[in-house]
Amino acid sequence: MFDLKKIKYNQLGFFRFKKLKNKYLLTNDAGEYLFLTEKEFGDFLNDNLKKDGEPYLSLKEKNFLKNELNLTGLAGRYRSKKSFLQGGPSLHIIVVTLRCNHKCVYCHASAQTMEKEGYDMSEKTAKEVIEKIFQTTSHFVAIEFQGGEPLVNWPIVQYIIEESYKRNEKARKDLEIRLVSNFSLMDEKKFKYLLDKKVGLCISLDGPEKIHNKNRILIGDKAGSYYYAAKWAKKFFKLYPKLVKKGYIFKMGVAITVSRFSLSYYKQMIDEYLKLGFDDIYLRPLNPFGFSKKHFQKIGYSAGEYIKFYRNALNYIIELNLKKKKKIRERMARTFLIKILTETDPNHLDLRSPCGAGIGQLAYNYNGDIYTCDEGRMLSMMDDKSFYLGNVQDSSYQDIVGNPVVRTMCLASCLEGLPYCENCAYNPYCGVCPIFNYSEQGNIFGQMPTNERCQINMAILDFLFEKLEDKKTKLILESWLKR
């Protein structure tokens, strides 16, 4: 233990710390980090370090010493880390329909069946959505089609693509358009159109056929959901070298949801993605919104169970990379690593402070209703419109982004002002989701010690910092930083 009376506070720059195994991890607001042994940490606190050797020189370089601060460098790094605050919403999620031909066991969107009427976006509404999107002050704009299953309302998907490109001829934004789909309604004509229009594709695929078809049930088709997902993934990666030569910049993404059925099959899942051609995956935990709450006893798991799965999966991924068998990376780990190892922030909207709700993203429902984010839209499908911002027909852009709900979300997700988060060593790398807190704990200001999302993030960061202490593993993790 350290004697608080002997600490030389006038020598210490601002830092947070935690004990990780047999060392102390120090971090600061600019995201710099350093490991110290217990003796080194004690000498640091008591100003007993030799000024011409380690770890003093590293503490100086990384701005942990009050009298040796490089304020210009510190401010520049902090400004770079928070640069996402300089523009308005950049991600615009458009739900062109709530209808879907699947009945997924954990459906996040509370989708409607195919025969239901009145759940498709109209051209009039789509036009107003595009109008709102191009009023954002962000130079970068990403339009992302979700659902339901967006291919169900293909004419409106086409309309939005065409009109967005046309509108951007004057707006001159850095525009990306993406489609998230189960691909069961894909055909050659649609596929060619999307690739020709340079639309980024993301396929819903939960791993091997047995797991995927158990999670994602395709209604009325004996072939099963996996058949179509695998078919189009293989086709994409076969074409990919030619697409790159034509200026296509996206690799196909994969939307994974880890259910209870997945927990024992981490190796088989990763092998499946590699077999199909994927080298970048996101092992996403279950979202508590939508139908998943009703079925949680059947498909859900504790934070501890997910953490065990994730550590096993990431160890296997690292092992494959170290043995040079296959190159594959996990996207949540990569997001944290960019925050830890670089001066930039990848702008992952629910892993930043404040979160992206209303200031980094907006979600547009099929009827033109606008929400802080897609999670807010999902809650509205459960008759809770707490995160509603207006409608494209009668709300101005200023009314939307200046809505008191947006300000409240910012307040509830600024880690610097949240109990527990403000003093956490992982503060510079983390983020909270007020809607997760609201859904799971009844308050947008979450109780972090019992918050399962917090437990997962903490465990992943523990794991990554442990791995960064190993030189060979660190080289692998650093290679993941490349685009």
Image: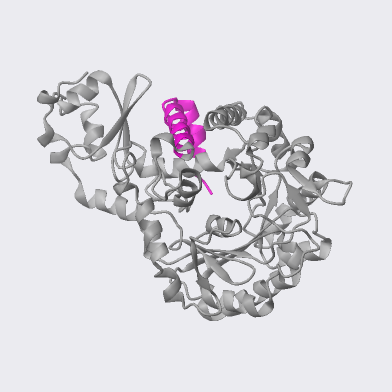
For the rendered model, the colour scheme is one colour
Return the x and y of residue 299 as percentages of the image width and height. 66, 36
Return the x and y of residue 263 as percentages of the image width and height. 65, 30
Is 354 placed left or right of 62 in the picture?
Answer: right
463 within the magenta span? yes
Is 331 placed left or right of 437 in the picture?
Answer: right
Q: Residue at x 21, y 40 (%)?
A: 14
Is 369 placed left or right of 425 in the picture?
Answer: right
Q: Residue at x 80, y 58 (%)?
A: 185
Return the x and y of residue 395 as percentages of the image width and height. 49, 77
174 within the magenta span? no
| Position of the N terminus by quadrant | top left
Q: Residue at x 49, y 28 (%)?
A: 473
Return the x and y of residue 199 as percentages of the image width and height. 66, 63
Q: Residue at x 42, y 48 (%)?
A: 443
Give above or below for 43 relative to 483: above
Q: To which quarter of the image does residue 401 belong?
A: bottom left
Q: To which quarter of the image does residue 258 belong?
A: top right
Give above or below for 259 relative to 73: above
Residue that sits furthest to the right in the current view: 222
| Predominant SS along the magenta part | helix
Stretch of the chain drawn in magenta:
454-483
Front one among 263 and 346: 263
Front one among 11 and 326: 11
Give above or below for 82 relative to 285: below
Can residue 380 be seen in the rendering of this structure? yes
